Every structure is written in structure tokens, then in C-alpha cells.
Amino acid sequence: MLTPKYIIFVSSPQRELAVERRAIRDFVEADPLLGRFFGVFLFEDLPASDRRPDQAYLQHVEAAAVYVGVFGQEYGAVDAEGISPTEREFDRATALGRERLIFVKGADSRRDPRMAALIGKAGSQLIRRRFTDVSQLTAGLYASLVEFLERQGDIRSLPFDAAACPQATLADLSEEALDEFLARARKNRGYAIGAGTPMRSALAHLNLLEGERPSHAAVLLFGKAPQRFLPTSEVKCLHFHGTEIRKPIPSHQVYKGTVFSLVDQALDFVMSKVNRRVGTRAGGAQAPVEYEIPRDAVAEAIVNAVVHRDYASNASVQVMLFADRLEVWNPGGLIPPLTFASLRVPHPSIPRNPLLAEPMFLARYIERAGTGTLDMATLSRDAGLKEPQFRFEHGQFIQVLWRPAGAAPQVTPQVTPQVTPQVTPQVESLLKVMTGEHTREQLQDLLQLSDRENFRLGYLVPAMDAGLVERTIPDRPQSRSQRYRLTPAGQALHQSLLRSKPDAAP
């Protein structure tokens, strides 16, 4: 039998209310919910020993998380100071700050004056509940214990994203990430507040505070290390050259960070591995890039998985690229009344995590209209691909986007060691879009990347470390006039990459 997380100490005069004490134990241990968390101690269960009973009982009070006082007519036997064990136990629970639940039975007119005084003392500190029979006692106890579990974070009545994140504080959130989001929301949606708004005020405006604590949504959106509190909120990305899940896995990445970063990193993973066509500059200075699977369809599938997943699940989002398709798995099924059939026609938007979805809307990662799956289908048809597929399997909602028939895994062109020792797909993508001097923001826009830290660590820093990109003002890295350009080695590689990529579609 598993050790219970919380012990309930039941206190009442020994010669009275034995039926009620046993009813509490039997009810808690048999209840499917309460039995998962609580064990019950009754003084009748204390084995024979050479310890004084009153001292043994007080030690069990100290070990308990919840004190339940069931008070009736009698006060009980007293010690040399005229105090009963029941009152001693109540006082010890009070001194230790334990959760105290008091249930009172019987008419006050027949009560021992000392018990009446104890009830009065308890009533001056907390709320008492009266009962007349066992059913009323267990019903009141159930409500109180469920409330206790909610306060401890063991169960939730609020949606997951609205509930406070246990152990997290405002210090665990990034002011930089919040400011970057507010600037983006102001620019994209005309949001009422902007960068520089105090964190507490901004979170309150977004309904991301539960009391004084950040909600799960706040941690997922702006946490410095969200996976410290929500380990399974990571995204696992896998690339298989065949059409089945089979080892060895050619490429496997586990991404961590905020939901914005998770979406950007997972999207980068997929788009760096599918075939793409680089067009001409006839229509402008920037050569257009077309992917074999529409980028916006891939982004929609990944955003759906990250935003609408069941975060109470121990599973993580998985993004798996096969030779013939892309599969995006997220824990949890469709929210009623949505069905697989309804995803193919106009339908309402019913977010599983509404307080998580709202900031993603403000940052233009999603739309509210419930058109995401329809857009995926339209984009696939326009690209000459099969219709997306949706299914439920192993507790996961699975979205499938199809690759063109005969699509082959992309092979990164070989570059001589004299040019660069290693070129990642991310650096490759960066070099292709650079045609002059660019600001960081311009480069992110060209690459269609939203997460600043992902761009910096995945693209810009590796390119600069490899000697392919340089600052225009190297002695002032933080200058507001800073731009980035290709070095001579970067220009050579830029031309080599463009020559190695045919303009024909895969």
C-alpha cells in the first residue's frame, strides 16, 4: 500500500463518538479521490507500548497535516492540570499551524461546560460545522478536504492555465521576455499596454496572476526556466528517413523554453529538414523561399499542439518528420463538442488553455476564429498535397501533414573546410537571406522567426562564431545603430549555397 501524502488526525473524547470516528476513517479510505491523498489516524489504532498515551497522541498530531476535531457532549478525562487530551491535541495542532477542521454534534444545552468552552475557543479561530448524523459529517468533511487539496495544488477547480503554479514566484519570470511580448502585442494587435509596464500590472492585465502567484500560463509564457516547474512542457522533435518510427534516429532534439520559443524551435527543426526552392530576385531584393510543405501549415500544427495540449499529462508534444509526412502529437483529445469531422468545416474556437491562447493571439501566433485546421487544409491543397489527417491514438491528438510523393530527405550541401568547418541548417538559412546590412529585427523578419533568443542562439551567434557574419559596429555591440553583414567568407559561402540549390521545385 502506498504511503499517503497527508495524515488526518481525528480527535474526540475517547468514550464518545466512536461510530463517527470510524465512519471518517472508512469514508476517507474508500473514497476514490480522498483515498489517493489521505490516511487517517485514530487513537484506537495506537498499538500497545510503554509510552504514555497522551504523549503518543501528541506526537501523532505533529506528524499529521490535518487535524479533525469531532466534538460532542463530553469533555473527557482530564490530566493533573484539569485539561483533557482532546483539548491538548487541539492546542498542539494550533501551535503547529496545522489545518484544523472542527465538527460539532449535539445540543448546546446538554453539553459539558468545559467542552462548550473548547468549542468556543475553536470558534474564535476558525469556522465550525455542525452535524446531526454520519452522512452530514462525511459530506462536510469531504468539502473541507477537497478545498485543502485545491489550496495545496493537488487538484484543480480552475483551468490548468489559470491555476497558480506551485512554488513559482514573480522572480521566476523574465522581464525581458514580458517586455518583448508587450512590444509585439502593441505592434501586431494594438494592445493597450506596452513594454516597460511593471510585471505585476502586466500580468494582472493578462489575468495571469492567481492571488500573488504567477499562474501556469504565466510560467509557460514568460518563465526563465518553465520546464523547472512543468517538465513535460518541452517539445521533442524527431526526424526519420523512412516512413516508420525506427532506430537509429537520424536527428532527435528536445527543446525547452517558453511556448513562444518552443514553437519557433520546433518550426525551425522541421523547415531546416524539408526540401525547399529558392526563387529569383525578380520581384525584389530578397529571393523568395518555398518549402515542400507550406511553412504556415507546419506552424499552425505546431502552435495547435503547444497551445491546446493537456498540460496535466505526463506526455510531451512530439513533432516527427518522416519521408512521406509530418506528424505532430499532443497530449489530450478534442474538447466537446468538437469532432474530427467538425475540424474540416467552419467551427468555433474552443481553447483548452484560454489564458495561454490569448497572449499567443496577441503575438500573432494564432487567430481566434477557429480557422487553423481549415487553413492547414487550404494551404496543403494549394501546394498540391493530400488533405491533412487528424486522429486520436494512445491518448494523443495527432495532426498529419503530407509531403509530396517521392520527397527525399534534404542533404546539406558540402562546403570545403577552408570555407567553414561546419554549417548548420539554421546558419545556412541565415546566410541565404543576407544581401546587405540588416538589423537584428530585419533578419528575424526575413527568417519569419518570432523568438529573439532562439534567433540569437540558433542563428546569429553560430554564424558570427564561424566567421561568416560580422557587426558593422564591432566595438559597440549594443549600439542602436548596429547592423549585421556577411564577411568575405560568408559572401563566398552565400554564393556557394545559392549555386548548389536548384531553382526547380522538389
Image (cartoon, rainbow, N blue to C red):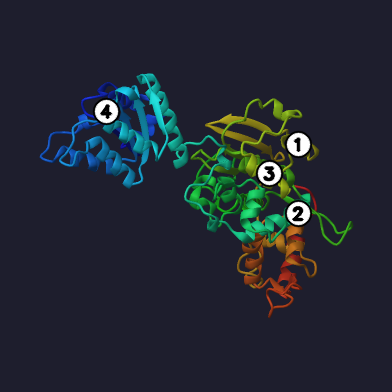
Q: Residue at x 66, y 47 (%)?
A: 206
Image: 298 above or below 129:
below
* Residue 429 % position (x, y): 71, 59
Image: 132 above or below 263:
above
Where residue 369 is drawn, which disc sits there?
A: 1
SS class, disc 2:
helix
Report, in whole angstroms, how far the alpha carbon at label 2 lies from the one at label 3: 14 Å
- Whichever of callouts 4 and 2 sits on the residue coming sooner in the sequence is 4
* Label 2 packing within 10 angstroms: few (<14), some (14-19), many (20+): some
- Contact (CB < 8 A) between labels 4 and 3? no
Where residue 186 is drawn, which disc sits there?
A: 2
SS class, disc 4:
loop
**Residue furthest bottom as drawn:** 475
Q: Nearer the viewer, mark 1 or mark 4?
A: 4
Q: Which residue is mark 4?
A: 112
Report, in whole angstroms, how far the alpha carbon at label 4 lies from the one at label 2: 68 Å
Horizontal placement of 280 versus 34: left or right?
A: right
* Residue 136 % position (x, y): 40, 21
* Label 3 packing within 10 angstroms: few (<14), some (14-19), many (20+): some
- Name the amino acid type tagged 1: Ala
- Contact (CB < 8 A) between labels 3 and 1? no
**Residue nearest the viewer, comparing 291 with 129:** 129
Report, in whole angstroms, how far the alpha carbon at label 1 lies from the one at label 4: 67 Å
Tell me, yes or no, if residue 322 can be seen here: no
- Name the amino acid type tagged 2: Arg
Q: Residue at x 68, y 46 (%)?
A: 360
Q: Residue at x 35, y 20 (%)?
A: 134
- Name the amino acid type tagged 4: Asp
Q: Which residue is mark 3?
A: 358
